[in-house]
Image (cartoon, helix red, strand yellow):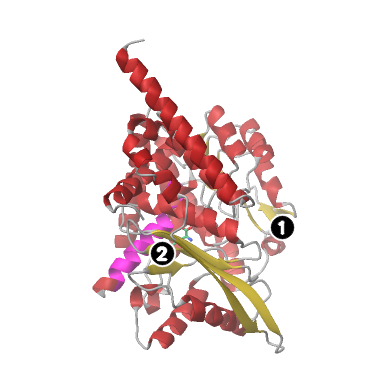
Amino acid sequence: MTKLDSIHTDNKKRANDYVHEVYELVKKRNPDEKEFLQATREIFDSLRPVFAQHPEYITNGILERITEPERIITFRVAWEDDQGKVHVNRGFRVQFNSDLGPYKGGIRFHPSVNASIMKFLAFEQIFKNSLTGQPIGAGKGGSDFDPKGKSDREIMRFTQSFITELSKYIGPDRDVPAGDIGVGKREIGYMFGQYNRLKGGYEAGVFTGKDPNHGGSLGRKEATGYGTVYFVEEMLKVKNESFDGQTVIVSGSGNVSIYAMEKAMQLGAKVVACSDSGGYIYDENGINLDTVKRLKEVENKRISEYTKEHLQAEYHDDCSAIWSIPCDIALPCATQNEIDEIAARMLVANSVKAIGEGANMPCTLEAMALFQENGVLFGPAKAANAGGVAVSAMEMSQNSMRLSWTAEEVDEKLHLVMKNIYTSCVDAADRFGHPGNLVMGANIAGFLKVADAMVAHGLS
Ligand code: GLU
């Protein structure tokens, strides 16, 4: 062994020991946080080659620091339903990292919300927001409030109560929330109104995802779904392929899913299935998107209603079975861990060519490994779904400049951001010895920018 070889081996060992040690620490400190540990595990595995080349990140304790949120706010949200009954929910805001800009990330209203889900989402946001190349830090918030079946007035009262407490901790240069599952422009509108009432002024840039008629950006609603398809389009080029003529499955039927379907269809794909929390629809003729949009965006109905208007379509009340339908491209756009090992095996057996994660962490670690082992192109969430937060950052810019860009201008910028993210992932994967591995590429490229800022800003 030459002297150089032995230095490399030493560095590699030191890096592996460091990653192992810190992971044990994170596990000990957050023993019950399954999703948060899953997200950290994936990042840690990707970063080994980085620490072997950059010992300064070890001496600066970057991994210990980056896995501990700067601040977590937990609060009581009391509200009254239409019958006058009092309810109490739990509110959260995880302000994870502010080295690149104000905390930025959505708010989720869903009964599954807890500290682990909030922390995994905010942690993912660190790398995702960094990848966009925009000046935004990372946060996430939410509540275990279930918006399903609530009246508009109940949603308003809950949201006002939620933001009355959270307003103490956010602001256009401090922390800028947006939507996520269960939070769309209606909820953002109520939050924005209540925040401004409390502050006694109009602070346009405190939320993103606002209605484009009232301070929001054109193209924000479409951005996550379109962005995911733009990213997958870049991935497909490696195999000299495109969306044209491909059979696609998109889980979910919220914002992300609807606009992923729309863009995939515009690019010539046939989307045959989508879902909601009750089940999935399969339409071999190709999903009629106008029907889905009307059912979900206007009438607030279940996806099962689709089959009443399209008699050839099937409805199955088992969401996870959506992945048994043969397809060329699968875009999981519903929620975390929706593709497990079993689902991944079905997709691989049906010769799926590409996966693009529109939701946050929709594939388990086992599913992800299976796709990679079988040569399936894999676009990880923090890269593939970064289009939403990227256009949020554009909304912040427009609010600061007090002007608004056209939908075409926003879409052009979004397309460029997604292409740049793809290139950064490919370059980072190459540079650290794992060519073609976009999971490692995304984690490393996202990490490097934040890690450098953390070194530059000193211990915190
Ligand atoms: N909730 C979205 C995400 O997961 C968007 C966040 C934002 O626009 O701030 O990235």
Q: Name the spot of residue 169 as percent of width and height, x first.
A: 43, 73
Residue under the image location 64 percent in, 52 percent down: 32
Residue nearest the observer in this picture, 252 or 427: 427
Residue under the image location 49 percent in, 48 percent down: 381
Crowding near the residue tagged with mark 1, few <14, some 14–19, many ≥20 C-alpha atoms within 10 Å: few
- Count of marks overlaid on the render: 2
Determine whether the beta carbon of the residue marked 2 sits less than 8 angstroms from the nearest atom of ligand 1: yes
Residue under the image location 71 percent in, 86 percent down: 85
Q: Is residue 36 left or right of residue 417?
A: right
Quadrant of residue 346 within the rendered picture: top right
> What's the residue type where badge 2 is placed?
Arg
Residue nearest the observer in this picture, 189 or 28: 28
The residue singled out by tag 1 in the image is 311
Q: Tell me: residue 93, above or below residue 334.
A: below
> What's the residue type where badge 1 is placed?
Leu
Q: Is the magenta stretch mostly helix, strand or loop?
A: helix
The residue singled out by tag 2 in the image is 220
Let me know if residue 69 appears in the view: yes
Q: Tell me: residue 367, above or below residue 181.
A: above
Q: Quadrant of the C terminus?
A: bottom left
Determine whether the beta carbon of the residue marked 1 sits less than 8 angstroms from the nearest atom of ligand 1: no
Give the label on residue 68, or none.
none
Q: In this view, does 341 lie to the left or right of 453?
A: right
Residue under the image location 71 percent in, 59 percent down: 278
Q: Name the spot of residue 92 as percent of width and height, x first.
A: 54, 68
Element under label 1? Answer: loop
Quadrant of residue 84 within the rendered picture: bottom right
Residue 390 lies in the magenta stretch: yes
Magenta span covers which residues?
Answer: 383-399
Q: Name the spot of residue 343 as percent of width and height, x first.
A: 66, 40
